[in-house]
Amino acid sequence: LKFSLCLLWNLFTMDRAKQIAGQVTAAPVAGTAADAIYVDPRNAHAYVNPATRFDPVPERYSQQEWGLRCQLAVAYRIAAHYDWDQLVFNHITVKVPESEKLEHGPHFLINPFGLHFREVTASSLLKVGIDGKIIDEGTGAGPLFMQGFVVHSAVHAHREDLHCVWHCHHPDTAAISMQKCGLLMLSQESLAFAGGRLSYHPFEGTAVDLGERDRIAKSLGPVNKAVLLENHGPVTGGATVEEAFVLMYLLTRACTYQQRAMAAAGGDLSKLITHTEEKVIAMSQREVTARTDDAPEEVKPDYDTPHLMFRAAVRLIEDRDGADRIYC
């Protein structure tokens, strides 16, 4: 029996390998949010085009948009896994490529209000214009949530470089947003935001004022990719879904560490191990320096960390939920 099971498993994996072989490309897809990429779970560096992985693509969508919808759908489920959701609230959005040239553009994809993050699918996503016009209602699963539109359109309207915008009410991060000290440079994760790379936006209450969009954009600024909405929660952005994901992962992780350290110290910041701003900046540059120092080429950090981290999370969700229940 054991031999038979092994033989069946080997036959299955060989057949699966043949299916995947025709989908793997020789090099990474270009680094834009539209380049939704998937990999063979046994090789985290092998890239697969989602438009060919899940056929047929619905006629109403281009292969590019469908791949983007698939990537965003699994991103919502990843967010739920990491406690970056709040029942039916919070949002992740992705700009539709080339939509700046269209009426109501740019357009972006967003979850319909009313679905839990684990219920979001590729076809259920709304496509909306920068002015709030519904371009595509998806499966009609729910309306556009006003607060989500305000926060996300603020970034999409003012930062062309940030194709994906990720917002949540992660408890530890929201708690840090309520403290005057803000994020402290206590952990490796926090160093991603050293040197003023984390912006702050004053609390204005629930985000239903369209005028706040300009103020959020001003607080974020022209360079930073993360902003802490005070008394509210974090917003991260990236040129890709992967980049926005990793920034959210690092920010929430850093805030959890800080919350636990402060609790262990009884709220006394003098008991925490801190460093001078000069040393913090130097530490934050170590990985960049490592790429150019005299270390052997074999150990230099020459890999796409955001892609590898996102792909690991995707495999986790696909194994749990089943790809056919996400990319549909």
Image: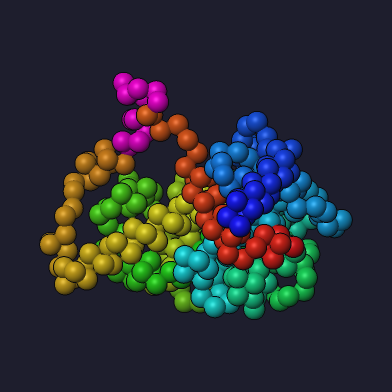
Q: Does residue 287 show up magenta in the picture? A: yes
Q: Is residue 160 left or right of residue 306?
A: right
Magenta-drawn segment: 285-298
Which image quarter is the N terminus in? bottom right
Report the residue at 64% width, 37% height from top.
29
Q: Is residue 257 left or right of residue 61?
A: left
Horizontal and vertical percent for residue 327? Answer: 71, 60
128 lies above or below 276: below
Residue closest to the eye, 127 or 43: 43
209 lies above or below 191: below
Horizontal and vertical percent for residue 247? Answer: 45, 52
Report the residue at 31% width, 21% height from top.
294
Residue closest to the eye, 72 or 195: 72
205 lies above or below 138: below
Report the residue at 31% width, 59% height from top.
183
Horizontal and vertical percent for residue 32? Answer: 62, 42
Q: Is residue 73 left or right of residue 216?
A: right
